[in-house]
Amino acid sequence: MGSTGDAGDITPADAQTPAVGDDEAGVPSPVSDVPAEPSALPSNPQISDFPSADIDEGVYEISSAGSNRVLDVSGGSCDNGANVQQYVLNHTNAQLWDFVARQDGGYFIKSGLGD
């Protein structure tokens, strides 16, 4: 999927990477489907702590290898400044992120919940 669509048009079927907890064949792993309490983010993470990578524009689920959870907009809120958290994968728009390339080589990351 390119970046020409409105983020409000994103659906879980647009995600480009295998879901956390699924193997390469798409078979679910024994990760619980029962919502769990959100896990705390590491204290004071720095952008420089992350390796640089070339990625394609599009829609992604952002997962944490350490917690086996994904980045999620808390409560599915569409409010500006809404909190994000690590949460159990549930394939909702609150867990989809649209990466749009900037002219300076960085990316805008927009929630799949819309503008």
Image (tube, rainbow, N blue to C red):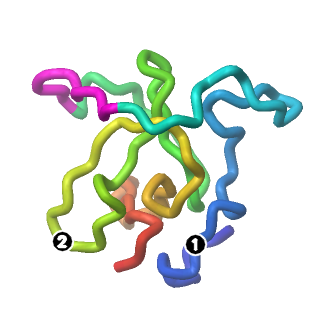
Q: Is residue 103 above or below residue 61?
A: below
Q: What amino acid does circle 1 point to?
A: Ile
Give the position of the C terminus as an image quadrant: bottom left
For the residues labelled 2 and 1, the Cα–Cα distance comes to 18 Å
Q: Residue at x 20, y 53 (%)?
A: 83
Residue 75 spot, x, y in % from top left = 31, 58
Q: Are marks 2 and 1 in contact (CB under 8 Å)?
A: no
Q: In the current view of this chain or complex, which residue is farthest to the top?
A: 66
Question: Could you tell me how many numbered marks the image carries?
Answer: 2
Give above or below for 114 relative to 49. below
Amino acid type at mark 2: Asn
Residue 101 falls within the magenta-colored stretch: no
Where residue 13 appears, x then y in whole percent?
A: 71, 62
Classify residue 109 as left or right of residue 57. left
Quarter occupied by the N terminus: bottom right
Helix, strand or loop for disc 1: loop
Place of residue 81 in the rendered image (x, y in percent of width and height, measured from the top left): 15, 64
Q: Position of residue 69 (x, y in %)?
A: 46, 31
Instruction: Mark 2 or mark 1: name the one nearer the start of the chain.
Output: 1
Give the class, few, some or many, for how many residues have Cα within 10 Å of label 2's Cα (few <14, many ≥20): few
Dominant secondary structure (helix, strand or loop) of the stretch shown in magenta: loop
Looking at the image, which is closer to me, 34 or 110?
34
Question: Can you tell which mark lies on residue 10?
Answer: 1
Front-lying residue, 52 or 115: 115
17 or 73: which is nearer to us? 73
At x 47%, y 66%, the residue is 112
* Residue range corresponding to the magenta coloring: 37-46
Q: Which residue is mark 2?
A: 80
Q: Secondary structure at mark 2?
A: loop
Hey, which residue is sitting farthest front in the picture? 34
Residue at (22, 27) in percent of width and height: 40
